[in-house]
Each structure stands twice: as structure tokens, then as C-alpha cells.
């Protein structure tokens, strides 16, 4: 296994005033899913642990609601390469269970401002994490860092870019090497995470 360490991921909060949102932390939890074999390459440890789910089989939009009490802030983003798929993990701090809405979009556009975001790859997955909160609401210190997070050369993920938190939603974009790659989305706990697996 080859490991490539990257710094924290930059996601920026936007309301009336723009505020930095995210941070970087190392996950030590063994609660993982969505790997069919040991990881081959990873950007950070957060996306590297093996698990039990199958390789993604469809490219349909996917969603799940957040818990009513969710107040979560993204603290880390990692990209890992497994046999048959690439994985993007959004690690969260705060309280509650995250929800999500993930689908392919034609262009990457920030919620609220309408600002276009340049993306590499031939397709774009928009990731919207529901139950999000600003640091002063979640109690999690914000941290800014490199943006984009690079993908793994030769994999399905080309990069991951942060955008804004707007009206309780963290918005991010995943550059995908080829159009209509099947993907799955799942949530993990200890700490809370949203995991997006994209077939190679």
C-alpha cells in the first residue's frame, strides 16, 4: 500500500458574511464500509480502511435525510483508491446524523452566489450534505486548507472541491474521469462521515 498525505480540505461557509468552515483531523475509527479489498492508494488514512459493501452499479441520484437535530461541520476530506472504485470521505464534527443529496450535474455552481467552479474530469458529481452548520453552531473549529483535494492518478476521481455552506447544506463537487460512472453513498458514525464510492 502506498500512502499520499495531504493537508486539510478547504470548504468555505457563506451567509451574510463569509466564514471559514472546515478543518482537518485524522480518523482513528474502525467503523468503515464500502471496500471489497484492501486499499491500494490513499490520499489520507480516512479513506483507506477496508469494509464490506459491493462495487457501485448505477449512476442514479441518491439521497437520505439528516436527523432533525443535526448540526455538523466538515472537518476533513480524503480520496482513496480501492480495487474497482475510488472513495471520497467527508468527515464531520458536531451532533446528529448527516443527510445527503448526490447526483451528476452539467456544471459546478455555488449555491447562493451562482459562482461557477472550474472542475477537471469529464463529469461532475455534486455532493450536498444536509444537517450542516457553521462552526459557531456545531462547536467544531473551522480550518481552511488546500482546495482542491487531488484525486488518485488513473482512478475515477480527478479532484474534490469545496464550495459553500448555504442554508444548512455543505456543497462540494467531485470531478469524475468519465461520464456516468456508477456510485454509492453511505453514512458512517464515530465520527460522522459521508462516503461516496465511484466505480472505476
Image: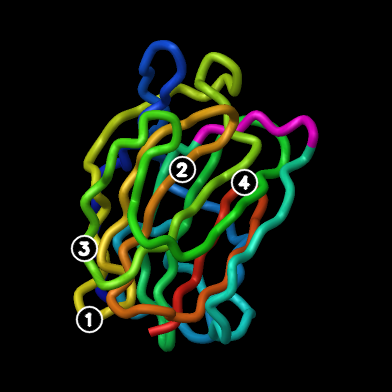
**What residue does disc 3 label?**
120
Which residue does the numbered mark 4 point to in the structure image? 192
The percent coordinates of residue 135 (x first, y second) are 50, 20
| Label 3 environment density (alpha carbons within 10 Å; few <14, some 14–19, many ≥20) | some
Give the answer, above or below, for where 173 lies relative to 51.
above
Residue at figure coordinates x 26%, y 46% from the top left: 117
- The residue depicted at 40 percent of the width and 74 percent of the height is 86
- Element marked by disc 1: loop
Q: Earlier in the sequence, mark 3 or mark 4?
A: 3
Q: Are marks 4 and 1 in contact (CB under 8 Å)?
A: no
Q: Secondary structure at mark 4?
A: loop
Name the residue carrying label 1.
154
Q: Are discs 2 and 1 less than 8 Å apart at CB?
A: no
Earlier sequence position, callout 3 versus callout 2: 3
Q: Secondary structure at mark 2?
A: strand
Q: Quadrant of residue 114?
A: top left
How is the protein colored in the picture?
A: rainbow
Q: Position of residue 122 (x, y in %)?
A: 27, 72
Query: Could you give the CA–CA distance between mark 3 and mark 2, rounded to whole angstroms?
Result: 17 Å
Name the foreground residue: 81 vs 57. Answer: 57
Give the magenta part as a residue range: 68-73
Amino acid at each position: 500500500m502506498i500512502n499520499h498525505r495531504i493537508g486539510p480540505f478547504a470548504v468555505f461557509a457563506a451567509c451574510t458574511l463569509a466564514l471559514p468552515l472546515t478543518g482537518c483531523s485524522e480518523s482513528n475509527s474502525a467503523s468503515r464500509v464500502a471496500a471489497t479489498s484492501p486499499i491500494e492508494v490513499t490520499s489520507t488514512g480516512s479513506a483507506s480502511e477496508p469494509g464490506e459493501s459491493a462495487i457501485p452499479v448505477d449512476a442514479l441520484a441518491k439521497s437520505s435525510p439528516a436527523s432533525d437535530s443535526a448540526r455538523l461541520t466538515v472537518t476533513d476530506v480524503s480520496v482513496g483508491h480501492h480495487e474497482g472504485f475510488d472513495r471520497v470521505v467527508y468527515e464531520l464534527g458536531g451532533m446528529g446524523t448527516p443527510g445527503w443529496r448526490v447526483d451528476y450535474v452539467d456544471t459546478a455552481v455555488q449555491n447562493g452566489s451562482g459562482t461557477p467552479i472550474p472542475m477537471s474530469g469529464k463529469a461532475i458529481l455534486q455532493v450536498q450534505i444536509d444537517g450542516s452548520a457553521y462552526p459557531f453552531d456545531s462547536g467544531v473549529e473551522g480550518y481552511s486548507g488546500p482546495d482542491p483535494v487531488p484525486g488518485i492518478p488513473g482512478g475515477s476521481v480527478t479532484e474534490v472541491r469545496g464550495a459553500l455552506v448555504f442554508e444548512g447544506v455543505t456543497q462540494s463537487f467531485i470531478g469524475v474521469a468519465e461520464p456516468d460512472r456508477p456510485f454509492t453513498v453511505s453514512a458512517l458514525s464515530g465520527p460522522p462521515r459521508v462516503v461516496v464510492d465511484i466505480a472505476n
